[in-house]
Amino acid sequence: MPPAAAFAGVILIWATTPLAIKWSSMGAGFLFAVGARMAIGVLVCLLILMARRSRIRHDTSALQTYLVAGLGIWSSMSCTYWGAQHIPSGLLSVIFGLTPVVTGVWATWLLQEQVFTPFRILGMVLGIIGLMLIFREGLGYRQEYLYGIIAIAAALALQSFSAVLIKRINAGVSGFETTTGGLLVSLPLFLLGWWFLDGGLPGKLEPKVVWSILYLGIFGSVIGFMLYFSLIHQWPANRVALITLVTPVIALMIGHLFNAESIGLYEWAGAGVILAALVSYVYGDQLLRRAMVEER
């Protein structure tokens, strides 16, 4: 697929995923919704393997990668699905927009990467301020709202931690293999969680719920990641990072238009500060170097 088409596809999928997560849990329960999504994702991956007449790697480093990816999927998605019940879907995307910042913090500790440049430090500080503004808005709501924000923030930290650990293992496993192996590891954990904490099959589901689960299983769990990983191989990292800037804005508009979600003043302010944090973290040093070259 051409990079521009993959770029548009990732933005469209990631911007609609938060609302689909919210809809998929309506009447079904979040444990059933996430378990069904992962089961569909595994089925799609296995069908792709059968069509390609291939199999994923199973050496030690590859298995370590699948284990880390699977635990990351299970822990972060569990927090995400629980938290999404209590906050507007658009805010979910805004908080996850801080992924590059949080990933940079983990990379400093686990990979010894030098990420603490002035503009990146500014991005981290602005990110914290943005989250504080969103928390400030939540003080005027029910207690579950704050718990929802905390759950999404935890999901972000867990997902970023998993991604950095995968990079540290450095097994050279493809994006599709990582997705397939991670889903195979996480699916039993999701099913066990559903069985012991819920165990009941939902009654008649609205078409919106069924289509949301199918959409997330096929596009959110498989196709979106395949497009994203292919984009990473074709485009420079700073251009791929534009996804994290564009997606939250579109997700906020989608939640408002299709789910009548209202966003408070502090939430809008927090979203704006988080976007500024991303610009500073991803592009600040690059823009500074360009300005210094032009002065010379």
Image (cartoon, rainbow, N blue to C red):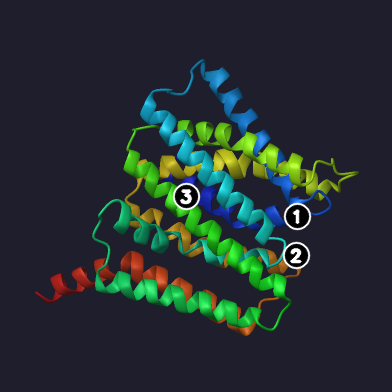
Which of the two discs, 3 and 2, sits closer to the camera? 2
- Pointers 1 and 2 in contact (C-beta within 8 Å): yes
Which of the two discs, 1 and 2, sits closer to the camera? 1
Whether residue 55 is visible here, answered yes or no, is yes
Total count of labels: 3
Left or right: 30 with respect to 117? Answer: right
| Image quadrant where residue 285 sits | bottom left
For the point 36% across and 56% down, the residue is: 239
Q: Secondary structure at mark 2?
A: helix
Depth check, front residue: 177 or 51: 177
Residue beneath label 1, please?
A: 23
| Image quadrant where residue 150 sits | bottom right
Whether residue 16 is visible here, answered yes or no, is no
Residue beneath label 2, please?
A: 259
Left or right: 116 with respect to 95? Answer: left
Residue beneath label 3, please?
A: 7
Left or right: 293 with respect to 180? Answer: left
View extreme (right): residue: 204
The x and y percentages for residue 153 are: 54, 64
The x and y percentages for residue 141 are: 71, 79
State whether residue 17 is above or below residue 101: above
Q: Secondary structure at mark 1?
A: helix
Say which amino acid is labelled 1.
Answer: Trp
The x and y percentages for residue 36 are: 72, 39
Tell me the distance, in whole angstroms, between the alpha carbons under discs 3 and 1.
25 Å
Say which amino acid is labelled 2.
Answer: Asn
Say which amino acid is labelled 3.
Answer: Phe
Q: Earlier in the sequence, mark 1 or mark 2?
A: 1
Q: Which mark is residue 193?
A: none
- Pointers 3 and 2 in contact (C-beta within 8 Å): no
Q: Earlier in the sequence, mark 3 or mark 2?
A: 3
